Image (spheres, rainbow, N blue to C red):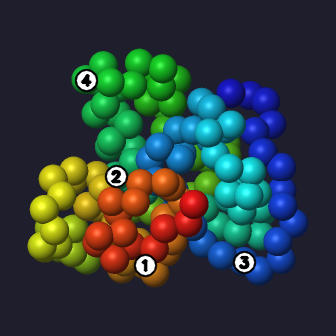
Amino acid sequence: MGRKLFTDCGAKEAVTYLLDTHTFLWCLLDPSKIPSRVRGLITNRNHQVLVSSVSAWEIATKFRLGRLPEAKEVATDIAGWVSRLGFAELPVTIMHAQLAGSFPQAHRDPFDRMLAAQSVVEHLPIVGCDRELAVFGASLLW
């Protein structure tokens, strides 16, 4: 995980992105799973990249349950890895929680519901390939 993961695509316009949990993990564990165009966008230092605190909850939970054994190094220092990649944390707010809890869609994953709510409330595109997030009105980039 200490090697250079990405290259900058050189885009000039500053944009803020919210990473889906799997995208954050792939940045660290298997960057080849992220299309090169997307890698360029999220590594462009003119852009702000956010990792939700709900992603930390999801990673820690799934690691504890044995569903992410390959993520031990990440799961034990999520904030450190967010910082090392030059990303920033997006905390969960009451507005996020209220919207996530009130979505009428029959989607039971609380992590996805919260990421979608954060995307909608903060007007942020989610960088990830989980099309199910769009049912909540989240904007997806991938």
Residue 101 position (above or below residue 27): below
Q: Which kind of residue does numbered mark 4 sit on? A: Leu
Res 5 seen here: yes
Q: CA distance from mark 1 to mark 4?
A: 31 Å
**Amino acid at dot 3:** Ala
The three-letter code of the residue at mark 2 reads Val
> In the rendered image, which residue does mark 2 sit on?
54
Q: Secondary structure at mark 1?
A: helix
N-term mark: 3 or 2: 3
Q: Is residue 124 left or right of residue 59?
A: right
Q: Residues within 10 Å of mark 4 (few under 14, many from 20)?
A: few
Q: CA distance from mark 3 to mark 1?
A: 16 Å
Q: Which residue is mark 1?
A: 122
Tag of residue 14:
3
Q: Residue 88: which quarter of the image?
A: bottom right
In three-dimensional space, the C-alpha distance between marks 3 and 2, rounded to whole angstroms, equals 24 Å
Q: Quadrant location of the N terminus?
A: top right
47 up-or-down from 2: above or below: below
Q: Please tell me how crowded label 2 is: few (under 14), some (14-19), or many (20+) other residues with Cα within 10 Å.
A: many
- The quadrant where residue 58 appears: top left
Q: 122 and 127: which one is in front?
A: 127
* 14 in relation to 81, above or below: below
User: Could you tell me residue 90's position as x and y percent?
Assistant: 45, 62
Callout count = 4
